[in-house]
Amino acid sequence: MRSTARRSTAIAAAALLLGCVSGPAASQPGDGPREKAEQKRVLVFSKTAGFRHDSIPEGVAAVQQLGESGGFTVDTTEDAGAFTTRNLRRYDAVVFLSTTGDVLGTAQQRAFEGWIRHGGGYVGIHAAADTEYDWAFYGGLVGAYFQSHPAIQPATVDVEDRGHPATSALGPAWPRTDEWYNYRSNPRERVHVLASLDESSYTGGTMNGDHPLAWCQTYQGGRAFYTGGGHTKESYADPAFRQHLAGGIAYALGETQADCRPENGYRPLFDGTSLDGWQQAGPGSFTLDEDGTLTSTGGMGMLWYAASGFTSYSLKLDWKVAGDDNSGVFVGFPPSDDPWSAVNTGYEIQIDASDVPERTTGSVYGFRSADLTRRDRALNPPGEWNTYEIRVEGERLRVRLNGVQINDFTNTDPARSLLDGHIGVQNHGADDQVSFRNVRIKELPATGD
């Protein structure tokens, strides 16, 4: 039977609606940790001790309606007194909505730090980066501090990771108008960058062509998402920006999973525009959609990267199934126009949540089951994107799903070897619809194993 996954937040529906603002959050007598069966709860905090954005009411209303459509409760406050250990236990995520200046006292900061360390989720919107400059914990949590901005103007946002729920509905380039922050430091080495600004598309960028705009990270036990968008009132009526926010909140709540480790040193093998270097083996094919997605059709065949083989590497790619579909990622096979060569001499990392353990999603097909408990917690359901990292070092193969390690396998079969081989993605059959995008690789030093 198909494994059971979390019920995902209704991101797309939530992004299309507007709502109203709830009253201030307040601790009630007897409040303690929420029961797991209760609806998840978000606190929107919009206190300002510096510049105040006139878009805050629109932002609060948008998050409120995202909650109504997405199945989580939203409270709003500008009272720093809500930041107590007891009251914060009521919430799964806190949104800092264009806060500015020093907004929390020492005891409130301490309570918030403890809440994050116990698994709380943080969402920072726009001027959340213009907040608490003397609080080192917060600086690490938000990722980077505001430095300056040019006039409001159109720009192109380059979407770097389209597997994360905050960016999965966007195309590779996202044109929009906003107030574009320059930051005091580049957070790329510390966070996972989801989107960045193309500084050639507007005037006033000061980050030397590497200008992160939205990112996520795990931070001292908690989850954090930040977006630099959201200065203008119009942002909160924009369906694409609302989807962006909804996905970030879903991640902070733990409703959807994503790999938010820093990602540097990868190069694309398939960037969404060209299949140079790739070949189809066997029947069927893949269609290349306008949004840069490859979708399987027919089979059983395989699209493989023929331009070169690889020895020691980290391979990452995003994948999505439409329903109970079958596919996989092959590694460690010799060049061949016969897709069965990969089956018989390489290893398949399976995509099919309804098969037996050694042949289900995350397994090394036919050889080793994934850790199914960890797999089920990490797996996003049909219709949502997932990210594999397949790490090959010597004869050792490790698999991460949305950042969670779910398999660790070492080859001992003398007829097979991971030390040098090609990679490919399978089109399993006419009834299987599986999509891939953003295939990238980072070559690693040889281990000598």
Image: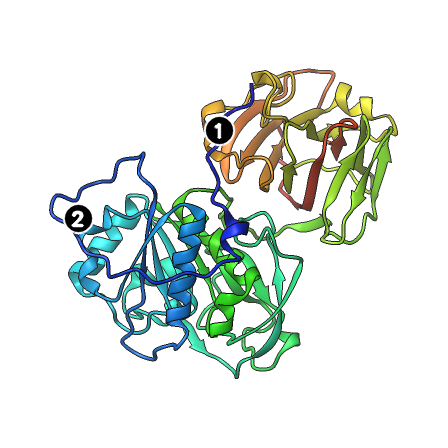
Q: What element does badge 1 sit on?
A: helix
Amino acid found under the numbered disc labelled 2: Arg
Spatial separation of the CA atoms under disc 1 and disc 2: 31 Å
Is 343 situated left or right of 35 in this image? right
Is 262 situated left or right of 311 in this image? left
Say which quarter of the image contains residue 350.
Answer: top right
Query: How far across and down, in percent of the image, does residue 71 sit?
Result: 41, 45
Q: Point out which mark residue 376 bears.
A: 1
* Nearer to the camera, 188 or 164: 164
In the rendered image of this protein, does residue 49 appear above or below residue 377? below
| First of labels 1, 2 by sequence position | 2
The residue wearing badge 2 is 86
Q: What is the tally of numbered marks visible in this picture?
A: 2
Q: Point out which mark residue 296 bears.
A: none
Amino acid found under the numbered disc labelled 1: Asp
Query: How far across and down, in percent of the image, does residue 428 sit?
Result: 76, 27
Is 433 situated left or right of 191 in this image? right
Say which quarter of the image contains residue 144.
Answer: bottom left
Say which quarter of the image contains residue 421.
Answer: top right
- Colour mode of the rendering: rainbow
Whether residue 421 is visible: no
Whether residue 108 is visible: yes
Q: Residue at x 45, y 50 (%)?
A: 69
Q: What element does badge 2 sit on?
A: helix
Task: Check the picture and name the quadrant holding the N terminus.
Answer: top right
Q: Residue furthest bottom?
A: 151
Q: Residue at x 82, y 26 (%)?
A: 339
Is 172 situated left or right of 190 in this image? right
Query: How far across and down, in percent of the image, does residue 40 sit?
Result: 34, 44
* Nearer to the camera, 289 or 224: 289
